[in-house]
Image: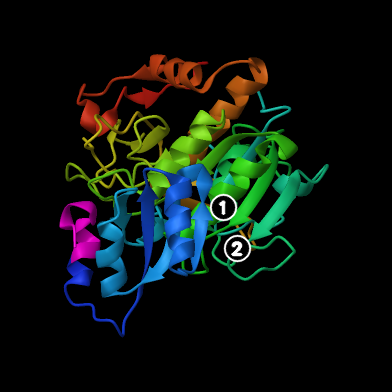
């Protein structure tokens, strides 16, 4: 067994594993087709994720040992649990504190989350939920049995049709919802990879320009599959916005895929104190400084999946769709802008708090764009 190619969390479980027990693992490959050939030769049952250059499969102690010794296999990860990044939720109907700018006309934002409730803000005067995919219960009709996905979508895309005050940042953008998180707000990483793969293969069909990922998982010492998947989408031309995580104020607590150096990682800003929220995860990561910027994330109002239709929530889950909506606005105004140009533009419109880049990145987004 080559322990240097096995993530620490998986190595810990391997030490107590026997051949009567299997775990779901991820195999990162140096050569996708050579690894596939090896897995086929020895009749492994696997799920290929070519876009992220990895495979998911069930493996016991002997399997992991054998796989770790293959030269074309780069690294082996566990299958960490992914969780939504909210800290609290409470029924309340208050006005949104900020105003939208460019409306997200002509853009599609994809939300990988707990689903979406067909809220008035999304379906009137026309239905902007153009696609719903359920990877958990496989229901064909849009629903949200948790509420988190509806809330997140409302921050980015709500149009405030009920009272004209709870409008999101891209209220004319189309919406795709992929339910990859359960009623409890969690999932396995392989389900998130299924969602990412669908986006990778279908983004041109549905004009997906922005992906919002208000969730996070514990990271490995190497780029894990979620990070690799997010980077693959980014390089495909899709703007990926991810939550930093709610494990602050300790350092080195950024969640995956927010640890990826390419994508836009959003921390939490508390407007009441004009400081980084205590719960907001901090960097650095092994790849450099994170988060990239902060956005409002404390006691924010958005769409609920039940009456009275609006609610209040805090967390980096809240900050992330604000930035995703602004990204859609930017692309609406400048359709040919690149991901790197969007990121540079956003960071240039931030205001520093203390200057600690591993706490606040470039600072908090001013919205004066």
Question: Who is closer to the viewer here, 305 or 116?
Answer: 116
**Mark 1, residue position:** 195
Q: Give the magenta-colored segment's residue range.
A: 1-11
Give the quadrant of residue 273.
top left
The color scheme shown is rainbow
Of the numbered discs 1 and 2, the one sitting upstream in the chain is: 2
Whether 6 is drawn above or below 326: the answer is: below
Q: How many marks?
A: 2
Q: Residue at x 30, y 55 (%)?
A: 70
Is 64 included in the stretch rendered in magenta?
Answer: no
Instruction: Find numbered disc 1 in the image and state the secondary structure of the residue it sits on.
Output: helix
Q: Residue at x 23, y 57 (%)?
A: 6
Give neighbour class at mark 2: few <14, some 14-19, many 20+ (Cα, 10 Å).
Answer: some
Q: Is residue 188 left or right of residue 140?
A: left
The circle on residue 212 is none
Task: Check contact, mark 1 vs mark 2: CB within 8 A.
Answer: yes
- What is the spatial separation of the Cα atoms under label 1 and label 2, in whole angstroms? 8 Å
Q: In this view, does 297 lie to the left or right of 4?
A: right
Q: Residue at x 31, y 57 (%)?
A: 77
The circle on residue 135 is 2
Q: In this view, does 142 lie to the left or right of 115?
A: right
List x then y, in percent, for residue 194: 55, 55
Question: Who is closer to the viewer here, 254 or 326?
Answer: 254
């Amino acid at each position: 067994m080559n322990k240097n190619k096995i993530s620490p969390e998986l190595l810990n479980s391997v030490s107590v594993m026997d051949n009567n027990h299997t775990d779901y693992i991820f195999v990162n490959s140096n050569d996708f087709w050579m690894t596939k050939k090896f897995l086929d030769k020895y009749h492994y049952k696997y799920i290929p994720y070519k876009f992220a250059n990895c495979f998911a499969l069930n493996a016991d102690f002997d399997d992991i040992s054998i796989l770790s010794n293959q030269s074309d296999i780069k690294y082996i990860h566990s299958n960490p649990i992914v969780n939504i990044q909210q800290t609290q939720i409470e029924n309340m109907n208050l006005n949104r504190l900020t105003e939208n700018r460019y409306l997200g006309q002509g853009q599609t934002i994809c939300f990988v989350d707990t689903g979406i409730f067909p809220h008035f803000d999304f379906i009137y005067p026309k239905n902007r939920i153009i696609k719903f995919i359920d990877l958990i219960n496989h229901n064909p009709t849009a629903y949200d049995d948790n509420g988190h996905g509806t809330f997140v979508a409302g921050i980015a895309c709500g149009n405030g049709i009920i009272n004209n005050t709870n409008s999101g940042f891209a209220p004319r953008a189309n919406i795709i919802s992929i339910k990859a998180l359960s009623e409890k707000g969690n999932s396995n990483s392989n389900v998130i990879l299924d969602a990412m793969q669908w986006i990778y293969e279908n983004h041109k069909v549905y004009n997906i320009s922005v992906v919002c990922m208000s969730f996070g998982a514990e990271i490995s010492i190497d780029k894990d599959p979620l990070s690799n998947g997010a980077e693959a989408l980014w390089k495909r031309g899709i703007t990926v916005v991810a939550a930093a995580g709610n494990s602050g104020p300790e350092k080195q607590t950024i969640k995956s895929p927010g640890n990826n150096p390419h994508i836009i990682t959003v921390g939490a800003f508390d407007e009441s104190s004009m400081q980084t929220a205590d719960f907001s995860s901090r960097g650095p990561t092994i790849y450099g400084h994170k988060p990239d910027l902060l956005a409002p994330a404390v006691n924010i109002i958005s769409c609920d999946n039940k009456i009275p239709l609006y609610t209040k929530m805090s967390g980096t889950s809240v900050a992330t769709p604000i930035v995703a909506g602004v990204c859609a606005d930017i692309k609406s105004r400048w359709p040919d802008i690149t991901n790197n140009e969007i990121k540079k533009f956003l960071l240039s419109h931030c205001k520093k708090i203390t200057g600690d880049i591993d706490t606040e990145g470039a600072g908090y987004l001013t919205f004066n764009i």
